[in-house]
Image (cartoon, rainbow, N blue to C red):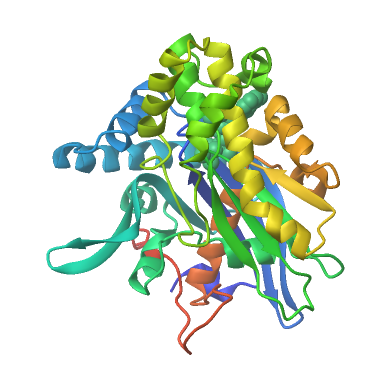
Protein backbone atom coordinates (compact mmCIF):
# COMPACT_ATOMS: atom_id res chain seq x y z
CA UNK A 1 0.00 0.00 0.00
CA UNK A 2 1.22 3.50 -0.78
CA UNK A 3 2.38 5.17 2.44
CA UNK A 4 0.66 8.40 1.58
CA UNK A 5 -2.75 6.88 2.17
CA UNK A 6 -1.88 6.08 5.81
CA UNK A 7 -0.73 9.55 6.75
CA UNK A 8 -2.56 12.77 7.48
CA UNK A 9 0.28 15.01 6.40
CA UNK A 10 2.22 14.45 3.20
CA UNK A 11 5.08 16.18 1.45
CA UNK A 12 4.58 16.18 -2.29
CA UNK A 13 7.04 17.39 -4.92
CA UNK A 14 5.38 18.84 -8.01
CA UNK A 15 7.33 19.12 -11.27
CA UNK A 16 6.67 21.21 -14.31
CA UNK A 17 8.40 22.29 -17.47
CA UNK A 18 6.33 24.61 -19.60
CA UNK A 19 6.18 25.58 -23.25
CA UNK A 20 9.13 27.96 -22.79
CA UNK A 21 11.38 24.88 -22.26
CA UNK A 22 13.60 26.94 -19.96
CA UNK A 23 13.82 24.72 -16.89
CA UNK A 24 12.38 21.97 -14.77
CA UNK A 25 10.52 23.68 -11.92
CA UNK A 26 10.23 21.75 -8.66
CA UNK A 27 7.99 22.77 -5.77
CA UNK A 28 7.34 21.01 -2.49
CA UNK A 29 4.04 21.31 -0.67
CA UNK A 30 2.89 20.02 2.68
CA UNK A 31 -0.67 18.82 2.32
CA UNK A 32 -2.75 18.05 5.39
CA UNK A 33 -5.91 15.99 5.32
CA UNK A 34 -7.49 15.55 8.71
CA UNK A 35 -10.98 15.50 10.22
CA UNK A 36 -10.75 19.27 10.52
CA UNK A 37 -10.29 19.69 6.82
CA UNK A 38 -7.71 20.17 4.14
CA UNK A 39 -4.81 22.59 4.09
CA UNK A 40 -1.76 23.30 1.95
CA UNK A 41 1.55 24.89 2.87
CA UNK A 42 4.06 25.90 0.20
CA UNK A 43 7.48 24.87 1.51
CA UNK A 44 9.97 25.85 -1.20
CA UNK A 45 10.88 25.55 -4.85
CA UNK A 46 13.94 25.03 -6.99
CA UNK A 47 14.60 25.21 -10.69
CA UNK A 48 16.96 23.11 -12.73
CA UNK A 49 17.85 24.62 -16.10
CA UNK A 50 17.72 22.26 -19.06
CA UNK A 51 21.13 21.42 -20.54
CA UNK A 52 21.34 22.97 -24.05
CA UNK A 53 21.34 19.50 -25.65
CA UNK A 54 18.01 18.55 -24.05
CA UNK A 55 16.42 21.97 -24.64
CA UNK A 56 17.41 21.88 -28.31
CA UNK A 57 16.15 18.30 -28.60
CA UNK A 58 12.75 19.29 -27.18
CA UNK A 59 12.49 22.41 -29.36
CA UNK A 60 13.50 20.48 -32.47
CA UNK A 61 10.68 18.06 -31.68
CA UNK A 62 7.91 20.50 -30.72
CA UNK A 63 8.67 22.96 -33.51
CA UNK A 64 8.90 20.23 -36.16
CA UNK A 65 5.67 19.05 -37.77
CA UNK A 66 6.96 15.52 -38.32
CA UNK A 67 9.44 14.50 -35.63
CA UNK A 68 10.81 10.98 -35.76
CA UNK A 69 8.90 8.44 -33.66
CA UNK A 70 12.19 6.89 -32.55
CA UNK A 71 13.41 10.28 -31.33
CA UNK A 72 10.24 10.74 -29.28
CA UNK A 73 10.79 7.39 -27.60
CA UNK A 74 14.44 8.20 -26.82
CA UNK A 75 13.73 11.73 -25.61
CA UNK A 76 10.94 10.46 -23.33
CA UNK A 77 13.53 8.35 -21.50
CA UNK A 78 16.33 10.96 -21.63
CA UNK A 79 13.95 13.41 -19.98
CA UNK A 80 12.88 10.75 -17.49
CA UNK A 81 16.54 10.37 -16.54
CA UNK A 82 17.13 14.13 -16.30
CA UNK A 83 14.02 14.63 -14.18
CA UNK A 84 14.95 11.70 -11.88
CA UNK A 85 18.42 13.09 -11.29
CA UNK A 86 17.14 16.62 -10.66
CA UNK A 87 14.37 15.53 -8.32
CA UNK A 88 16.69 13.18 -6.41
CA UNK A 89 19.07 16.08 -5.73
CA UNK A 90 16.13 18.19 -4.62
CA UNK A 91 14.84 15.41 -2.35
CA UNK A 92 18.33 15.05 -0.84
CA UNK A 93 18.48 18.78 -0.05
CA UNK A 94 15.07 18.48 1.62
CA UNK A 95 16.20 15.46 3.63
CA UNK A 96 18.99 17.58 5.07
CA UNK A 97 16.27 19.87 6.41
CA UNK A 98 14.49 16.83 7.86
CA UNK A 99 11.81 16.93 5.18
CA UNK A 100 10.79 13.49 3.94
CA UNK A 101 9.11 13.50 0.54
CA UNK A 102 6.18 11.06 0.09
CA UNK A 103 5.36 11.31 -3.59
CA UNK A 104 6.17 13.06 -6.86
CA UNK A 105 3.76 14.65 -9.33
CA UNK A 106 5.24 15.24 -12.77
CA UNK A 107 3.58 17.14 -15.57
CA UNK A 108 6.26 16.30 -18.12
CA UNK A 109 7.13 18.25 -21.25
CA UNK A 110 4.44 18.95 -23.80
CA UNK A 111 5.72 18.07 -27.24
CA UNK A 112 2.38 18.34 -29.00
CA UNK A 113 -0.88 20.00 -27.99
CA UNK A 114 -3.77 19.48 -30.38
CA UNK A 115 -6.83 20.83 -28.51
CA UNK A 116 -9.11 21.44 -31.48
CA UNK A 117 -10.97 18.49 -32.92
CA UNK A 118 -10.04 17.40 -36.44
CA UNK A 119 -11.34 14.64 -38.73
CA UNK A 120 -8.93 11.69 -38.61
CA UNK A 121 -9.46 8.05 -39.44
CA UNK A 122 -13.15 8.76 -40.00
CA UNK A 123 -13.65 10.30 -36.54
CA UNK A 124 -13.52 13.72 -34.97
CA UNK A 125 -10.66 13.67 -32.46
CA UNK A 126 -8.13 15.82 -30.51
CA UNK A 127 -5.16 15.03 -28.24
CA UNK A 128 -2.07 16.15 -26.39
CA UNK A 129 1.29 14.56 -25.52
CA UNK A 130 3.64 15.07 -22.60
CA UNK A 131 6.90 13.15 -22.24
CA UNK A 132 9.46 12.52 -19.46
CA UNK A 133 9.09 8.88 -18.43
CA UNK A 134 7.31 8.60 -15.07
CA UNK A 135 8.56 5.01 -14.79
CA UNK A 136 12.15 6.25 -14.74
CA UNK A 137 11.23 8.70 -11.98
CA UNK A 138 9.42 6.06 -9.88
CA UNK A 139 12.24 3.53 -10.25
CA UNK A 140 14.94 6.05 -9.42
CA UNK A 141 13.29 8.01 -6.61
CA UNK A 142 11.65 4.98 -4.96
CA UNK A 143 8.48 7.04 -4.69
CA UNK A 144 5.03 6.83 -6.23
CA UNK A 145 4.81 9.17 -9.21
CA UNK A 146 1.66 10.70 -10.67
CA UNK A 147 1.94 11.92 -14.26
CA UNK A 148 0.11 12.45 -17.55
CA UNK A 149 -2.55 14.67 -15.96
CA UNK A 150 -4.02 15.88 -19.21
CA UNK A 151 -5.21 12.59 -20.68
CA UNK A 152 -8.30 12.17 -18.47
CA UNK A 153 -9.52 15.60 -19.57
CA UNK A 154 -9.06 14.66 -23.23
CA UNK A 155 -10.89 11.37 -22.64
CA UNK A 156 -13.97 13.15 -21.25
CA UNK A 157 -14.14 15.51 -24.20
CA UNK A 158 -11.99 18.40 -22.92
CA UNK A 159 -9.02 20.03 -24.62
CA UNK A 160 -6.50 18.65 -22.13
CA UNK A 161 -6.11 22.22 -20.83
CA UNK A 162 -6.62 24.13 -18.64
CA UNK A 163 -6.52 21.35 -16.05
CA UNK A 164 -5.12 23.08 -12.98
CA UNK A 165 -8.21 25.19 -12.19
CA UNK A 166 -9.26 22.99 -9.24
CA UNK A 167 -5.73 22.99 -7.85
CA UNK A 168 -5.44 26.76 -8.32
CA UNK A 169 -8.71 27.11 -6.43
CA UNK A 170 -7.26 25.08 -3.55
CA UNK A 171 -4.05 27.13 -3.59
CA UNK A 172 -5.38 30.65 -4.08
CA UNK A 173 -9.09 31.07 -3.43
CA UNK A 174 -9.63 33.39 -0.50
CA UNK A 175 -12.51 33.62 1.95
CA UNK A 176 -12.86 37.37 1.43
CA UNK A 177 -12.03 38.27 -2.16
CA UNK A 178 -12.31 36.96 -5.64
CA UNK A 179 -8.91 36.54 -7.30
CA UNK A 180 -7.73 36.91 -10.87
CA UNK A 181 -4.37 35.32 -11.66
CA UNK A 182 -2.55 35.73 -14.97
CA UNK A 183 0.23 33.28 -15.73
CA UNK A 184 2.71 34.48 -18.33
CA UNK A 185 4.81 31.48 -19.36
CA UNK A 186 5.43 30.33 -22.92
CA UNK A 187 1.69 30.79 -23.40
CA UNK A 188 -0.40 33.08 -21.21
CA UNK A 189 -3.49 32.02 -19.32
CA UNK A 190 -5.82 33.28 -16.62
CA UNK A 191 -7.65 31.86 -13.61
CA UNK A 192 -10.65 33.58 -12.10
CA UNK A 193 -11.25 32.25 -8.59
CA UNK A 194 -14.40 33.42 -6.80
CA UNK A 195 -14.23 33.67 -3.03
CA UNK A 196 -14.57 30.43 -1.09
CA UNK A 197 -18.18 30.88 -0.03
CA UNK A 198 -19.39 31.95 -3.48
CA UNK A 199 -21.52 29.65 -5.60
CA UNK A 200 -19.92 31.12 -8.72
CA UNK A 201 -17.77 28.88 -10.91
CA UNK A 202 -14.02 29.30 -11.28
CA UNK A 203 -13.01 30.20 -14.81
CA UNK A 204 -9.81 29.54 -16.73
CA UNK A 205 -8.55 29.85 -20.26
CA UNK A 206 -5.44 30.54 -22.27
CA UNK A 207 -5.13 34.15 -23.46
CA UNK A 208 -2.77 33.39 -26.36
CA UNK A 209 1.01 33.68 -26.57
CA UNK A 210 3.14 34.52 -23.53
CA UNK A 211 6.92 34.83 -23.86
CA UNK A 212 7.25 32.28 -26.62
CA UNK A 213 7.38 34.67 -29.60
CA UNK A 214 9.77 37.07 -27.93
CA UNK A 215 12.02 34.13 -26.89
CA UNK A 216 12.15 32.75 -30.43
CA UNK A 217 13.03 36.18 -31.85
CA UNK A 218 15.73 36.70 -29.20
CA UNK A 219 17.31 33.40 -30.24
CA UNK A 220 17.20 34.41 -33.87
CA UNK A 221 18.48 38.01 -33.60
CA UNK A 222 20.70 37.93 -30.53
CA UNK A 223 21.43 34.22 -29.80
CA UNK A 224 20.00 34.79 -26.33
CA UNK A 225 17.33 32.74 -24.58
CA UNK A 226 15.11 35.71 -23.62
CA UNK A 227 14.93 39.49 -23.40
CA UNK A 228 16.01 40.14 -19.82
CA UNK A 229 13.62 42.59 -18.14
CA UNK A 230 12.32 43.48 -21.63
CA UNK A 231 15.29 45.82 -22.18
CA UNK A 232 15.57 45.30 -25.94
CA UNK A 233 11.80 45.52 -26.54
CA UNK A 234 11.78 48.76 -24.54
CA UNK A 235 14.37 50.28 -26.86
CA UNK A 236 12.21 49.67 -29.94
CA UNK A 237 9.15 51.35 -31.40
CA UNK A 238 5.79 49.59 -31.66
CA UNK A 239 4.77 49.24 -35.32
CA UNK A 240 1.05 49.92 -35.69
CA UNK A 241 1.05 48.28 -39.12
CA UNK A 242 2.60 45.05 -37.82
CA UNK A 243 0.19 45.12 -34.87
CA UNK A 244 -2.76 45.28 -37.25
CA UNK A 245 -1.43 42.29 -39.16
CA UNK A 246 -0.81 40.27 -35.97
CA UNK A 247 -4.16 41.19 -34.42
CA UNK A 248 -5.84 39.24 -37.21
CA UNK A 249 -4.43 36.13 -35.46
CA UNK A 250 -5.55 36.96 -31.91
CA UNK A 251 -6.50 33.88 -29.93
CA UNK A 252 -10.27 33.71 -29.89
CA UNK A 253 -10.73 32.38 -26.41
CA UNK A 254 -14.17 31.14 -25.55
CA UNK A 255 -14.42 29.22 -28.80
CA UNK A 256 -11.32 27.28 -27.77
CA UNK A 257 -9.78 27.32 -24.30
CA UNK A 258 -6.20 26.34 -24.96
CA UNK A 259 -3.40 26.92 -27.39
CA UNK A 260 0.28 26.09 -27.81
CA UNK A 261 3.48 26.49 -29.79
CA UNK A 262 1.67 24.89 -32.73
CA UNK A 263 -0.46 28.04 -33.08
CA UNK A 264 1.78 30.68 -31.49
CA UNK A 265 5.35 29.61 -32.21
CA UNK A 266 7.52 29.33 -35.32
CA UNK A 267 4.51 29.84 -37.63
CA UNK A 268 3.72 33.24 -36.08
CA UNK A 269 7.42 34.15 -35.95
CA UNK A 270 7.76 33.42 -39.69
CA UNK A 271 4.83 35.73 -40.30
CA UNK A 272 6.34 38.45 -38.10
CA UNK A 273 9.64 38.18 -39.97
CA UNK A 274 7.99 38.24 -43.38
CA UNK A 275 6.04 41.44 -42.71
CA UNK A 276 8.82 43.10 -40.71
CA UNK A 277 11.07 42.81 -43.77
CA UNK A 278 8.46 44.52 -45.91
CA UNK A 279 7.97 47.22 -43.26
CA UNK A 280 11.76 47.55 -42.80
CA UNK A 281 11.57 47.13 -39.02
CA UNK A 282 14.65 46.79 -36.81
CA UNK A 283 15.00 43.81 -34.43
CA UNK A 284 14.17 46.13 -31.50
CA UNK A 285 10.98 47.34 -33.20
CA UNK A 286 10.03 43.73 -33.93
CA UNK A 287 10.57 42.81 -30.27
CA UNK A 288 8.61 45.85 -29.05
CA UNK A 289 5.69 45.01 -31.34
CA UNK A 290 5.76 41.34 -30.39
CA UNK A 291 5.54 42.23 -26.71
CA UNK A 292 2.68 44.61 -27.52
CA UNK A 293 0.84 41.80 -29.33
CA UNK A 294 1.42 39.49 -26.34
CA UNK A 295 0.09 42.13 -23.93
CA UNK A 296 -2.88 42.91 -26.14
CA UNK A 297 -3.72 39.17 -26.32
CA UNK A 298 -3.80 39.07 -22.51
CA UNK A 299 -5.83 42.27 -22.29
CA UNK A 300 -8.46 41.19 -24.77
CA UNK A 301 -8.86 37.84 -22.97
CA UNK A 302 -9.48 39.42 -19.55
CA UNK A 303 -11.00 42.84 -20.17
CA UNK A 304 -14.61 41.57 -20.20
CA UNK A 305 -14.06 39.61 -17.00
CA UNK A 306 -12.46 42.58 -15.24
CA UNK A 307 -15.45 44.78 -16.08
CA UNK A 308 -18.08 42.16 -15.31
CA UNK A 309 -16.61 41.06 -11.97
CA UNK A 310 -15.36 44.55 -11.04
CA UNK A 311 -11.83 43.32 -10.47
CA UNK A 312 -9.51 45.93 -8.95
CA UNK A 313 -6.40 43.82 -8.49
CA UNK A 314 -4.76 40.98 -10.39
CA UNK A 315 -1.78 38.74 -9.66
CA UNK A 316 0.95 37.70 -12.07
CA UNK A 317 2.77 34.37 -12.12
CA UNK A 318 5.32 32.85 -14.52
CA UNK A 319 8.57 34.17 -15.99
CA UNK A 320 6.79 36.95 -17.91
CA UNK A 321 6.15 38.82 -14.62
CA UNK A 322 9.88 39.59 -14.60
CA UNK A 323 9.69 41.31 -17.98
CA UNK A 324 9.29 44.82 -16.56
CA UNK A 325 8.54 46.33 -19.95
CA UNK A 326 5.77 43.80 -20.63
CA UNK A 327 4.21 44.44 -17.21
CA UNK A 328 4.33 48.20 -17.77
CA UNK A 329 2.59 47.80 -21.13
CA UNK A 330 -0.07 45.59 -19.50
CA UNK A 331 -0.58 48.21 -16.79
CA UNK A 332 -1.14 50.86 -19.49
CA UNK A 333 -4.08 48.81 -20.82
CA UNK A 334 -5.50 48.38 -17.31
CA UNK A 335 -5.09 51.78 -15.63
CA UNK A 336 -7.67 51.03 -12.94
CA UNK A 337 -6.34 47.63 -11.97
CA UNK A 338 -3.56 47.07 -9.47
CA UNK A 339 -1.04 44.54 -10.82
CA UNK A 340 0.89 42.55 -8.23
CA UNK A 341 3.20 39.55 -8.34
CA UNK A 342 1.78 36.42 -6.73
CA UNK A 343 4.96 36.26 -4.63
CA UNK A 344 3.27 38.69 -2.23
CA UNK A 345 0.88 35.83 -1.38
CA UNK A 346 3.66 33.65 0.04
CA UNK A 347 4.47 31.50 -2.97
CA UNK A 348 7.28 32.05 -5.46
CA UNK A 349 5.69 32.96 -8.79
CA UNK A 350 8.15 30.73 -10.65
CA UNK A 351 6.74 27.61 -9.00
CA UNK A 352 2.98 28.07 -9.08
CA UNK A 353 2.39 25.50 -11.82
CA UNK A 354 4.72 22.96 -10.20
CA UNK A 355 2.80 23.54 -6.94
CA UNK A 356 -0.52 23.01 -8.75
CA UNK A 357 0.69 19.63 -10.01
CA UNK A 358 1.70 18.67 -6.45
CA UNK A 359 -1.91 19.39 -5.40
CA UNK A 360 -3.19 17.31 -8.32
CA UNK A 361 -0.77 14.44 -7.61
CA UNK A 362 -1.85 14.18 -3.99
CA UNK A 363 -5.50 14.23 -5.02
CA UNK A 364 -4.90 11.45 -7.56
CA UNK A 365 -3.20 9.24 -4.96
CA UNK A 366 -6.21 9.79 -2.71
CA UNK A 367 -8.54 8.94 -5.60
CA UNK A 368 -10.05 12.43 -5.43
CA UNK A 369 -11.21 14.56 -8.31
CA UNK A 370 -10.31 18.23 -8.43
CA UNK A 371 -12.78 19.01 -11.16
CA UNK A 372 -14.97 21.90 -10.12
CA UNK A 373 -17.53 21.91 -12.88
CA UNK A 374 -19.46 18.75 -13.29
CA UNK A 375 -21.75 17.91 -16.12
CA UNK A 376 -22.31 14.39 -14.94
CA UNK A 377 -22.06 12.61 -11.62
CA UNK A 378 -18.70 11.00 -12.24
CA UNK A 379 -15.84 13.44 -11.83
CA UNK A 380 -12.51 12.45 -13.39
CA UNK A 381 -9.38 11.93 -11.31
CA UNK A 382 -6.50 13.43 -13.27
CA UNK A 383 -3.21 11.53 -13.54
CA UNK A 384 -1.67 8.09 -13.92
CA UNK A 385 0.17 6.39 -11.08
CA UNK A 386 3.58 4.73 -11.46
CA UNK A 387 4.66 2.72 -8.44
CA UNK A 388 8.14 2.46 -6.91
CA UNK A 389 9.89 -0.91 -6.65
CA UNK A 390 8.70 -3.27 -3.91
CA UNK A 391 10.93 -3.25 -0.82
CA UNK A 392 12.24 -6.71 0.03
N1 LIG B 1 14.19 38.51 -15.97
C1 LIG B 1 13.36 38.22 -16.98
N2 LIG B 1 13.05 39.18 -17.89
C2 LIG B 1 12.25 38.92 -18.93
N3 LIG B 1 11.72 37.71 -19.17
C3 LIG B 1 11.98 36.72 -18.30
C4 LIG B 1 12.81 36.90 -17.17
N4 LIG B 1 12.89 35.73 -16.51
C5 LIG B 1 12.15 34.84 -17.21
N5 LIG B 1 11.60 35.42 -18.29
C6 LIG B 1 10.75 34.81 -19.31
O1 LIG B 1 10.00 33.77 -18.74
C7 LIG B 1 10.12 32.58 -19.52
C8 LIG B 1 9.95 31.37 -18.65
O2 LIG B 1 8.70 31.48 -18.01
P1 LIG B 1 7.98 30.22 -17.40
O3 LIG B 1 6.94 30.73 -16.49
O4 LIG B 1 8.98 29.28 -16.87
O5 LIG B 1 7.29 29.62 -18.69
P2 LIG B 1 6.91 28.10 -19.00
O6 LIG B 1 5.92 27.71 -17.96
O7 LIG B 1 6.37 28.15 -20.37
O8 LIG B 1 8.20 27.33 -18.90
C9 LIG B 1 11.47 32.71 -20.19
O9 LIG B 1 11.54 31.94 -21.37
C10 LIG B 1 11.56 34.20 -20.44
O10 LIG B 1 10.93 34.54 -21.64
MG1 LIG C 1 9.44 27.32 -17.41
How many numbered circles are shown?
A: 0
Left or right: where 389 falls relative to 316: left
Against 236, residue 339 (above or below) is below
The percent position of residue 351, horizontal first and vertical second, equals 62, 44
Quadrant (top left/top right/bottom left/bottom right) for the C terminus: bottom left
Image quarter for residue 226? top right
Residue 89 seen in the figure: no
Write down which quadrant ligand 1 falls in. Answer: top right
Against 37, residue 73 (above or below) is above
**Residue pushed farthest left?**
121
Q: Nearer the viewer, residue 29 or 174?
A: 174
Q: Nearer the viewer, residue 52 or 375?
A: 375
The percent position of residue 13, horizontal first and vertical second, equals 56, 52
Against 282, residue 8 (above or below) is below
Q: Nearer the viewer, residue 67 or 336?
A: 336
Left or right: where 248 falls relative to 194: left
Left or right: where 22 falls relative to 173: left
Image quarter for residue 151? bottom left
Quadrant (top left/top right/bottom left/bottom right) for the N terminus: bottom left
Residue at x-position 23% and y-position 67%: 124
The percent position of residue 108, horizontal first and vertical second, equals 41, 48
Left or right: where 275 falls relative to 351: left
**Residue pushed farthest bottom?**
377
Residue 251 seen in the figure: yes
Residue at x-position 38% and y-position 65%: 385
The percent position of residue 260, horizontal first and vertical second, equals 42, 45
Against 142, residue 285 (above or below) is above
Amino acid sequence: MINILKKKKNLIVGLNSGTSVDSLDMAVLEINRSRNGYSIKYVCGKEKKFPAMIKNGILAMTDNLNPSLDDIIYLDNILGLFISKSVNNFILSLKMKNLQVDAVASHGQTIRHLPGKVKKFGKSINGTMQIGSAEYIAQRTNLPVVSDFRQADIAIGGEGAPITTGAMHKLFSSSENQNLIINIGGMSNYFYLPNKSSSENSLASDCGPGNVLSDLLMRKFYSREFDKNGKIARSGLISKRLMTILNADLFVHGKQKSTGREQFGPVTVDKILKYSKKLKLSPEDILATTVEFTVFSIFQAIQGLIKKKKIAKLYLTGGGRKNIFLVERLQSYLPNCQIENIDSEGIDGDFVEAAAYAVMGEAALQGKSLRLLQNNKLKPVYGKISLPPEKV
